Every structure is written in structure tokens, then in C-alpha cells.
Image: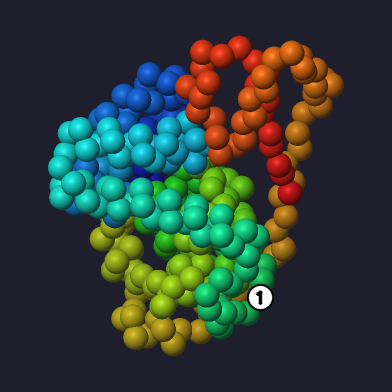
Amino acid sequence: MNLRNLHKENQPNLFTEDNKKIIFPTNYTEILERVSSVDANAYGKTRNFLWGKVSYLSPYISRGVISLPFIKEEILKNYNLKTAEKWVSELAWREFFQRIWQAKGDAIHTDLRNTQFPIKHKNIPTAILEANTNIHAIDEGIKNLIDTGYMHNHMRMYTAMLTTNIGQTHWYKPAQWMYYHLLDHDAASNHLSWQWVAGAFSSKKYIANQENINKYTGSNQANTFLDRSYEELSALEVPNILSNNITWNEVTTLPNSDELKINDQEPIFLYNTYQLDPLWHKQEVGCRILLTKFK
């Protein structure tokens, strides 16, 4: 089963002809067109479905190409605040996570509010890494993530809950794994969302059963270990397929570069992977440097 083909008539053109790569334009004009084409009304009604009217702006937001205030202002040109409430609230959540990161620093890599419980280990289930959990929609979502760098937000929640609350895996290493693969990787949004699902940054854990997954992904799978009531899931032992786990460490190898040459007579503009705004000091001549940090 290939979820890329489900409800295809309702989906934007996000795949190339080989049906693998999601299209995220890098031309600034096209990015602005994507902002102006946001349907805030449909977003509020359909955003939880895989084929819902989401914006696909997250890589540009997380890299600082477009800002949250800019997007809000553009959306409110076409919609009143009541209609766009859900859209604007999602922008607020992203900003909230950023402010938590700003205030807590590296503490976002630890259980921030509650100690996650119970946990069996701090690795990653092998079935998650291999997209072989036997929950077809989630497996397809993981494959899409590896292929394209994109995963729908609801699918991120499903993957996180299966890993942490069903598989009883500590959230941190799986969050790092997802962060590594995402085009829109953002430590605050990613890590704090995983903590929210696992109950480490929320008042309760997030759990979805097979009926819920079927509804929002368009799948029709039955008789799985998630095909139970929520009361049964809360007491479920770790399924055998999620028991095997391995240590995951991915290394990013950067290419060799020539020695940096700076003209000390010109101003220096420093960019980082969260701030790539092409309009920043656009009219000024200077040395533009991109700072990166990899662990």
C-alpha cells in the first residue's frame, strides 16, 4: 500500500514524476507564492489528515527564510483572525517552543517537566529504523521521511507515540533520529514535540489506536496490536516487534573547504541554519558567512 496515492485528487503537487521527491522550491518568488496560497479556512478543518490543506512552509520557517510575523501578516490580509485562528495558533506554538529553547538551553535534551515512565531502554526500536513496525501507515510515513525529508505533523505524532508510549523507548534518541532526517529540522519544535507526546513536557501521554490512524491516514488496516480500545492500549505490554533495539548514531561529513578569506574593510553578515533570510541587509555589500554546527 502506498499512501502517496491515497486521496490523490485532494493533494497538492508535492511529488516529482518518479513519485518520490517532495517539491520544495528554493526560488524566493515561488516561496512567497506558497505563502499567499495558504487556505487558512481549509487548514483548520483538514490539517490532521495526510491529504489535508497544510502549507508545506515548515522548511522555510525553520531555516529563517520567512519569519512567523511575516506569515501571520500575509495570512491576515486574506482572512480574519477568527477564520485563521487555528493557523495562527500553530505559528504561536512554534514561537512558544523557540522561547522555551531560549530559556532552557540544552535542558530541552532532557525530560523537561516530567520523568518519562515507563521506559525499557534509551536506544531506538529496530522496527522504527527499518520502517517495519507492521503498522502500514506509519511504516510508509517513515519511508517517506527517509526518501523526502518530509513528514506530516500528525504522522510525526504517530511515530513518536508508537516509539515512546507503545515501545517504551526514551524519547531523546528517536527525536535525534527524526531531527537528522527532517528538512525542517528544528531542535525546539522537534524535541519538545517528542517530549509532549511522551508525557515529559505535557500533563498526559499521547496515544492513538488503529481506528484513529486509519481515519487520518486513509488506511484500512485491522487486527494489529494497536487495534484496541484506549484502555487496553494504556496497559499494553511492549509488542515483540518493538522489543529489539539498537544504538543509533549518525555522522554528518562536511566537505573540505578553502581557508576563509575576509575583507576587514567590509561589514560582516553572519547567518546560521536558522536564519537564511535572503532579504536581510540585501542592499548592503559585505562578507556573508554561514555558521554551522554539527554534533
* Residue at 76% across, 37% down: 253
* Residue at 16% across, 39% down: 79
Q: Residues within 10 Å of mark 1 (few under 14, many from 20)?
A: some
Residue 97 shows in the view:
yes
Q: In this orientation, which residue lies closer to the viewer: 5 or 43?
A: 43
Q: Position of residue 71 (x, y in %)?
A: 33, 36
Residue 52 shows in the view:
no
Q: In this orientation, which residue lies closer to the viewer: 8 or 198?
A: 198
Asked if 61 appears above or below 286 in the picture, the reply is below
* Residue at 57% across, 79% down: 115
User: In the figure, is residue 22 to the left or right of 169?
Assistant: left
Q: Position of residue 87 (x, y in %)?
A: 27, 47
Q: Position of residue 158 (x, y in %)?
A: 42, 62
**Residue that badge 1 annotates:** 121
**Image quarter of residue 37:** top left
* Residue at 34% across, 86% down: 231
Asked if 192 appears above or below 165 in the picture, the reply is above
Q: In this orientation, which residue lies closer to the viewer: 140 or 162?
A: 162
Q: In this orientation, which residue lies closer to the viewer: 168 or 93?
A: 93
